[in-house]
Image (cartoon, rainbow, N blue to C red):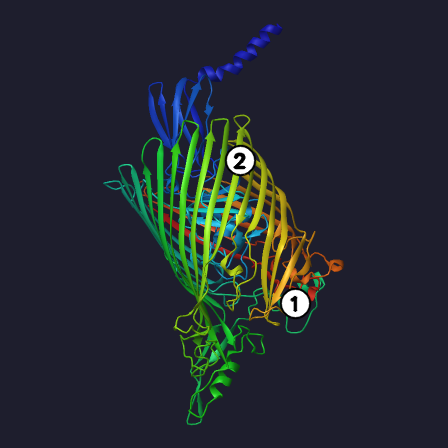
Amino acid sequence: MKHFITALVALLLTLPAVAQTTFSIRGRVLDKVTGETLPGATVQVTGNVQNTGTGADTEGNYKIGNLAPGTYTLQASFVGYKPSTQTVRIVAQNVVASFPLSSDNASLAEVQVVASQAQERETPVAFSAVNEVKLRETLSNRDLPLILNETPGVYATQGGGGTGDSRINVRGFDQRNVAVLINGVPVNDMENGQVFWSNWDLGDVTKSLQVQRGLSASKIAVPSVGGTINVLTKGFDDKKAVLARVETGSNNYQKYSLMLSSGQLKGDWAVTVYGSRRTSDGWVDKAFDDAWTYFGTVSKRAGKHTLSLTGLGSPQRHGQRSFPFEVYKYSYEKAREIGAQVKSGGDKGFQYNPYWGTLDRYSIVGGVKVSHGVETLNERTNFYHKPQVNFNDLWQVSDRLFISTVAYASYGTGGGSSTLTGNSTTNSVTDANGQTGFQKIYDTNYAAVGADGKRQSSEILVNAVNSHRWYGFVVGGDYLLNDKLTLSAGVDGRDYTGLHYREVRDLLGGDYYVNGGNQNNPTARLGVGDKLSYNYDGKTRWMGGYSQLEYKTPLLSAVLSVTLSNVAYKRIDYFQKVQPDGSPVSTDWTTFNGYSMKAGANYNLTEHDNVFVNVGYNSKVPFFNLLYTTSGRKYDNVKSEGITSAEIGYGISYPSLKVTLNAYYTLWANKTTTSFNSATGVYSNVRNVNARHMGIEMSIAQEISRRLQLNSAISLGDWRWTGKGLLNQTDEAGFPIEGGLNQAVFLNGVHVGDAAQNQFQVGLRYEPFRGAFIRPSFLLFTKYYADFNPETILNQATSTDSYRLPTSRNVDVHFGYDFKPMFKNGTRFGLKASVLNVLNEFYFTDVSNRSNSNAGNLDLLQAFFNRGRTFTAGLSIGL
């Protein structure tokens, strides 16, 4: 009887399979690096007298039914990705087969030599990637760096709150020491390393955004310490497409954009163009935003060459909140929370911005005051246009030799505005509300009538112009020595001229201004557009080269690379007394040689587990601005800085689970910092001090179910100064102040400030029903020490950390819905919306060192806070 029952149960269990004569194959198509789904991907099935296929839905899912038992070959493909093939066998049940696809866009290939994209289970570096889908769903109206807060080791803020004023730190190193590449072209300022995100609005045309932390895979000699950010834009797309978007949001945010892609045309041509218009009042008071953006690329395949010409730019103007203030001015409650003083005239709100005012440019006619209306005037604005043109030639010379050439040019024009009293940018006049006292300034200037009937302005508005002319090229080649070894080599050349001066922007009621700072004409009467204060050119010539040997097998990949660079600086000053022959004062060329050595290896333990290790040393050439004071004096004994780095990591990779865990150690030797105290006129230069950055980082991406995915990032850091530095202090003329040479600075053990050392992030993507998504994200930063000036720690007995800021937390929510294709599946509508800072909580994001204190006195603490709750919503139409 027992055997009979067992047989009966077995028979009942197999009856459904016996009854079912056909089966299905289903699964998902995902981005191999990020785990994001790829809606619209194609899956083709062949074999067993079948040749059919289907497309992935808006969640990246596919299903092919009515398949008889047998063996099938599946191929998944998606524009911009390498096809992937699997063989499956159907016996007596349905089969699940998912496809993680690797990027393979022509534009990506073109920059592979000069801005290598790290590859999972191959490249021995720690990296995180954000694909096109996540960018579209979560960027909202933020600057591009802010989306990277969801990757480990990154701290990005909006700075003063103006559009494009964001800054980013990677592993505690600010963006001056993080290399940023757009399509393989370096964009950090050649004189100070800064990145000005207002120069581009690339969110809508970015194909991939990758952060390589620590020793990057980049093959050019970029000035990177914390890592490298690679921004790759759209390139050669095979499909015709039209995409239009309309967006709106808080603070009168409006954006309209249109993108057209021709697809592959006759003769293997392809064209993609994009344009947008963006305006906003800004969350910070009067931090308005007014920008246009254009982008275009023309590609051509010609035999063994793939050629492309890309142009982009974003002429813009936006209001700024340039400097932070004491906490009580924003909020009495926040001041009391940290134990800072509370004074009258504060509690103005976190959007408080003193850098604007109102003005009536009246005139007096026949003794009668005639009003011309009241205008709102921004004291601090940024205006810039940096068109950039790249020409790329990808040449597959043979099966073994590949050569890539990039030639580029950038022609930046613009700067920032401020008030001017004498030769200082300090505003001396405010009104009763704490705003810039434009009316008081105007009244004073208008009343200052001289004997000749002309009015001399005592305070004016000026523009600080920082234009540039930048030309460069990158030529690199890969030669396949054998099926395992590849030799790479290349040259990176740049020629840069920075044009720096102040010009009169607005005389504010006067007819002229005197005391322009020009030693060749010190009493000149200056009008609008005339130069004053300073006027100099900074020239930089850069020549670098690299060589790399790469070994690769399915189990082991290893890299050894060396870079060399020769950098020369020259300063030409047009306001110093001209030389006897009438030529401007010019310094000699000052030359530095830099180099780096990197080695790393990745070993795939199993099909799903890998480990990697890398070590390296970087002799970093100092920036132009660390070589000269603003008055043109050259600092003494400026030397290259040395950065030693080592890292070890472990990864787990499944179609539904990706985990990375890595530990790093970086020692920055002979680090140099400079500062200027406007109150005393003292320049401070601290050198020969070391900074040690070490920590661990982990990221997790888990597909919990078809509808629910989780992503998380954790980083724990310990960043401290080590050793004892030397301080030299000079006046503006470059002469040492009394007792100002070779003073000891006691920094040993003091935490590095300016960024949160610990980070925790967790986010979900949930699909409640087909076509819809919701993405909540929680972000927490802690162990954030305020920025400070090293020269304030001159007593070993009182050496201490700067103020440790309270823990910050933030919640964002993004959601959207993609309608089913309409009009013969040729038109797609999509709705997306975001709510940023859902809880409307406020926390410290940036703390200044302007007070020349180590922030031990909380009454002197000057800070920026995050912006309050805001929303955006948009409608897209794709054809």
Left/right placement of residue 448 relative to residue 295 reads: right
Position of 327 relative to 444 (above/below): above
784 or 512, nearer to the observer: 512
Give SS at disc 1. Answer: helix
- The mark found on residue 328 in the picture is 1
Position of 651 relative to 472 (above/below): above
- Quarter the N terminus occupies: top right
Q: Quadrant of residue 26?
A: top left
Q: Nearer the viewer, mark 1 or mark 2?
A: 2
The number of numbered discs placed on residues in the rendered structure image is 2
Give coordinates of residue 389: x percent, y percent. Answer: 35, 53
124 or 119, nearer to the observer: 124
Residue shown at the point (58%, 43%) measured from the top left: 645
Left/right placement of residue 16 relative to residue 267 reads: right
The single residue placed furthest to the bottom in the displayed view is 366
709 or 394, nearer to the observer: 394
Q: Classify 10 Å Cα crowding around label 2: few (below 14), some (14-19), many (20 and above).
A: many
Residue shown at the point (39%, 23%) measured from the top left: 73
**Sequence-wise, which precedes: disc 1 or disc 2?**
1
Q: Quadrant of residue 77?
A: top left
Residue at the spot of label 2? 600
496 or 526, nearer to the observer: 496
Q: CA distance from mark 1 to mark 2?
A: 50 Å
Give coordinates of residue 636: x percent, y percent. Answer: 56, 61
Q: Tell me if residue 35 can be seen.
A: no
Q: Quadrant of residue 104?
A: top left
| Mark 2 residue type | Gly
Q: Classify 10 Å Cα crowding around label 1: few (below 14), some (14-19), many (20 and above).
A: many
Give coordinates of residue 806: x percent, y percent. Answer: 67, 55
